[in-house]
Amino acid sequence: MVAPFALATVADGGAERPALVVGFDENPRWRDLSDLAPTVHALLQDWDPVLRKLFTLTGEATRPLAREQLRAPLVPGQILQAGANYRTHVVELAVKHAAGERPESEVRAEAVAAMERRTADSEPFLFIGLPSAITGPYDDVVLPGYSRQHDWELELAAVIGREAFRVERDRALEHVACYTIANDLTMRDLVFRKDMPALGADWYRAKNAPGFTPLGPYLVPAAFVPEHPRIRLELNGEVMQDESTEDMICDVAALVAAASRTTPLRPGDLLLTGSPAGNGIAHGRLLRPGDVMTGTITGLGGQRTRVVAP
């Protein structure tokens, strides 16, 4: 299915404007939506009537859109992130972290068994991200000088369009307005605290540097996104990640339901759903200045991120 339209934030005449975009896969054209709301986040606050209105405006999206005009599609409210949510990815990380300490076959077998138990229990692992880490889909990302292990994690991200609080899994997808692309960059050497190992992972410092969440370029309404889109990341033209969301342990509905048990999810909140196999730590090739990441997800367009030195 090709989406008839998407939402974006477009730089135009010194201002950033909410935009309706048509033909975004080949010949993008846009219409300024500032007459409806000042931002994409504001459009999501009244999503049902806005969505109906957008269908009537597609013929008015006539202005050519250049990639350079695209900014992060929205500034989210809350950012919730799912960790360890792809079976193959978790097994890869377990093997890599235990390298040299125990036989690989033993570690792999334990990780596979743990994934089977998690799949049966379907209890997501969730943590919180910062909106200040968001950057545009074509912006450069600066590698912080206090870390030496910078990694990519391309992910499907769900955008909330209807408030969700303690919703059941079978109704959870009714609260998802759109999907977009996120690259949840990670400083691997800062994940675990050597000074306080008993406290576990420190996701705050490992994932939230400025620009460490390239987002977009588009928000595509949920009805137009395939059930199991394919997530693909290339590094300097070489495929690193290429996996369907079928490898998820907890699907989007399970993640929304679990997140909503603790806090109300509100329109404009962002839920990252986890990264599939193929991260740099597993390949033994982490990010370096000058690298270019190209990320695509079926039906959602693509982003391009150049890595620069501190």
Image (cartoon, rainbow, N blue to C red):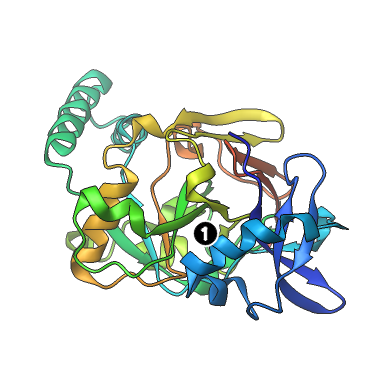
**Horizontal side, residue 61 vs residue 116: left or right:** right
As drawn, the residue found furthest toward the front would be 56
Residue 56 x %, y %: 67, 59
Residue 291 x %, y %: 70, 44
Q: What residue do we see at 56% from left, 31% from top?
A: 240
Quadrant location, the C terminus: bottom right
Residue 149 x %, y %: 51, 50
Q: Residues within 10 Å of mark 1 (few under 14, many from 20)?
A: few
Residue 175 x %, y %: 36, 60
Q: Using the image as rendered, state which of residue 275 and residue 47 is in the foreground.
A: 47
Q: Is residue 74 above or below residue 90?
A: below
User: In the rendered image, which residue does mark 1 sit on?
Assistant: 147
Q: Is residue 204 above or below residue 302?
A: below
Q: What residue do we see at 41% from left, 34% from top?
A: 245
Q: Quadrant of residue 269?
A: bottom left
**Horizontal side, residue 228 vs residue 33: left or right:** left
Q: Using the image as rendered, state which of residue 267 and residue 189 is in the foreground.
A: 267
Quadrant location, the N terminus: top right
